[in-house]
Amino acid sequence: MGFSEAAFNYYISSDHIKGDDLDLIRKNFKNKEFECLLDVATGAGHCAAAVPAKRRCTLDPSIPMLKTAKEKFTLNTPVCAVAEAMPFADNTFDIVTCRIAMHHFKSPDLFFREAKRVLRPLGWMILIDNIVDVEDSYLNVIEYIRDSTHVRSYRLDEILDFAGNDFRLIDYTCLFKKHDFPEWAGRLGGEAETLERIENAFKDLPDDIQKELEVEKTYGRISAYTDKKGFFVFRSV
């Protein structure tokens, strides 16, 4: 099952329907209303719905995801496209958001370049995504077993390099996200053999990595783990 077939699973996903990151968006912009928002790789639309904006445009390569976002959150300006080639004129939006998606992008540097292009001068960009440390190979391999569209989760310094001189970092928060393992592993509807491979990969992690990920077991089965999310607030320069 791919993203298109799993659109409803992402709408009801406990990892997406709520979170400290959505709370931070609401807190940071509670007294502001943007003219025009672009939510990149919108998925089921949770992030777009959280941002106060008069007009909301959602972008995603999956038509079923866009349909779900439209139906569930009344997000009525869907665009089917990839993050690295946004079909918009320069200086179109005053905020671009991207939540828990950049690890799927083939060229994050092009995504940042496109975000800069479509933003108005001094526009805002909110980026939320997985953050890994130096020993990043373990979690990236497990993510790929679960989801073949996973490209890579990045280190903090790499993300700042993507931003380069086009963006100024206004704020950064490291968030810890606890995942219900059976729900997370099965969200894309993998075969039983794939789910077993994912669980065994967690069990085979070195002790220090299991401790870092706060891997929890119930009756010998993996029940939860915790990873890091980076919450970045950028402004274009």
Image: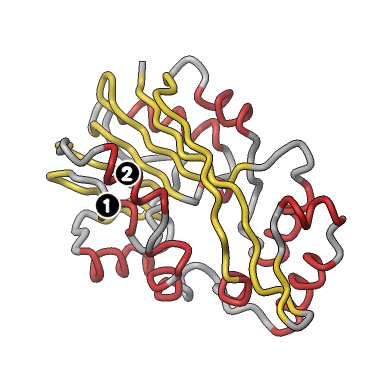
Q: Quadrant of the N terminus?
A: bottom right
In x, y percent, where is residue 76? 19, 59
Q: Is residue 139 left or right of residue 62?
A: right
In x, y percent, where is residue 193? 76, 82
Q: Is residue 59 left or right of residue 189?
A: left
Q: Is residue 7 above or below residue 139?
A: below
Q: Is residue 78 above or below residue 223?
A: above
> Which residue is depicted at the point 82% across and 68% down?
203
Number of numbered discs on residues: 2
Q: Quadrant of the C terminus?
A: top left
Q: Identify the disc placed on residue 50.
A: 1
Q: Are marks 2 and 1 in contact (CB under 8 Å)?
A: yes
Amino acid type shown at disc 2:
Ile
Mark 2 = which residue? Answer: 25
> Which residue is depicted at the point 74% across and 44% down?
136
Q: Is residue 37 left or right of residue 201?
A: left
> Which residue is depicted at the point 15% across and 46% down?
55
Which of the 4 image quadrants contains residue 206?
bottom right
Say what secondary structure mark 1 lies in: helix
Say what secondary structure mark 2 lies in: helix
Nearer to us in this view, 47 or 170: 170
Q: Residues within 10 Å of mark 1 (few under 14, many from 20)?
A: some
Q: Is residue 199 left or right of residue 37?
A: right
Q: Is residue 53 above or below residue 68?
A: above
